[in-house]
Amino acid sequence: MENILISGGSGFIGSNLALKLVSLGYKVNVLDNLSSQVHTDTIENSHTFKSIKDKVNFIRGDVRNRNDWQKAISNSTIIIHLASETGTGQSMYQIEKYVQVNCGGTALMLDILSNEKHRVKKVVVASSRAIYGEGKYHSKKFGFVYPNARDNIQMTNGQFELLCSITKIPLLMLSTDEDSKIHPSSIYGITKSNQEQMVHVVCKSLGISSIALRYQNVYGPGQSLSNPYTGILSVFSTRILNNNSINIFEDGKQTRDFVFIDDVVDATVLAIQDDSIKSCSLNIGTGESTTVLKIGKLLKKLFNSEVNIDISKQYRIGDIRHNKADITKARELIGFRPKVSFEFGIKKFVEWVKSQEIYSDMYDQSINEMKNKGLMK
């Protein structure tokens, strides 16, 4: 069996993937810095870290440190590179950190693979739907279009849908396929696109297989309840458990493609095990979209809560309007088929949240940070 390294392996996706791989008989090494934003200030309270600490070879280290990478890569045959700073909003003002971790950390890994002895034959890198920006749309006048980020004046006036730049008629959202234009609207999206490009270019030159998995909005039991910068299911749940109202940006009709953690793990395992692919990028989602307002209402119902849902018409610079992945390529190349419906998945998520300690609600703090940086309008 392969000796697999997972960078960021004690995070939400990484820990679930590690447990799956261990159950399949793989030897798993994990490199992770146990960031307090993800794991809370007390590591002993980290659900994901506790779930793997006695089952994998754990290396506490930072992807910005060459020695940590060298230690982790030794004897590894496959690298699953998940370690990343995540969150579109935060990336717009923690620019240096996002670039250093996401781009710099990936560059260090690839530099070692290019200049030092190793046994690595495949790299799977976690990419993101954020690389597409607003994604793929259809215009009655121009056909397929890839609109730029929405105009501030337009959104200030409460017009949140994407409009044709010439006719000003609303565009029709389409499923975004892998051949769609890459034009991210956040620093986070830029760094994920950069990671993909670096991995594909360098691995091809070295004869190493490379697969970039463009994860959509991943959710499920185990995702951080203390990090207010990623995951609206966690943010809304924490608000509800602290008896605070749910603030929904724009008009609540914006959509996302939510994919359950088990499906993401299955897709990643398929990518690991497929030896026929030399280099490709794949969307990993469900191909379906759900409105943010529907999520708020579902969570309120499942938690049996009476908190208010406030549709604030606020908007955040860098946010996209809609998102839905075309997963045809992943189905054809690696046999990926999502199995968990959103209705079932959100129930499993809520059941897990109810079993957890109620975390402090850091939402208002994060909103104030973005307001102070001019990113919340």
Image (cartoon, grey):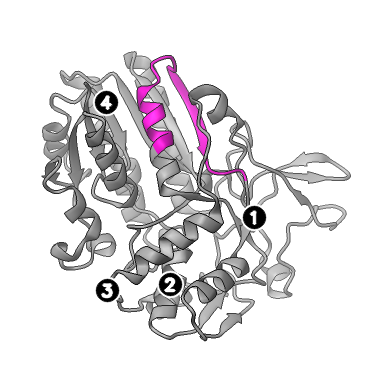
Give the foreground label among 4 and 3.
3
Give the foreground label among 2 and 1.
2
The residue nearer to you, when weighing 360 against 147, is 360
Dot 1 surroundings within 10 Å: few (below 14), some, or many (20 or more)? many
The image quadrant where one finds the C terminus is bottom right
Q: Amino acid at mark 1?
A: His
Residue lying at 30% horizontally and 75% vertically, measured from the top left: 359
Q: Amino acid at mark 4?
A: Ile
Measuring from the top left, give residue 327's x and y in whole percent.
58, 35
Measuring from the top left, give residue 310's x and y in whole percent.
59, 82
The tag on residue 322 is 1
The reply to whether dot 2 and dot 1 touch (C-beta < 8 Å) is no
What is the spatial separation of the Cα atoms under label 4 and label 2, in whole angstroms? Answer: 36 Å
The tag on residue 237 is 2
The residue nearer to you, when weighing 133 against 72, is 72
Q: Which residue is mark 4?
A: 78
Q: Is residue 277 above or below residue 373?
A: above
Q: Which residue is mark 3?
A: 357
What is the spatial separation of the Cα atoms under label 3 and label 1, in whole angstroms? Answer: 33 Å
**Magenta span:** 266-287
User: Which badge, 2 or 1, is on the more N-terminal residue?
Assistant: 2
What is the spatial separation of the Cα atoms under label 2 and label 1, in whole angstroms? Answer: 22 Å
User: Which badge, 4 or 2, is on the more N-terminal residue?
Assistant: 4
Q: Amino acid at mark 2?
A: Ser
User: Which badge, 3 or 1, is on the more N-terminal residue?
Assistant: 1
Q: Quadrant of residue 95?
A: bottom left
What is the spatial separation of the Cα atoms under label 4 and label 3, in whole angstroms? Answer: 36 Å
Is 275 magenta? The answer is yes
Q: Secondary structure at mark 4?
A: strand
User: Which badge, 4 or 3, is on the more N-terminal residue?
Assistant: 4
- Left/right placement of residue 273 relative to residue 130 reads left
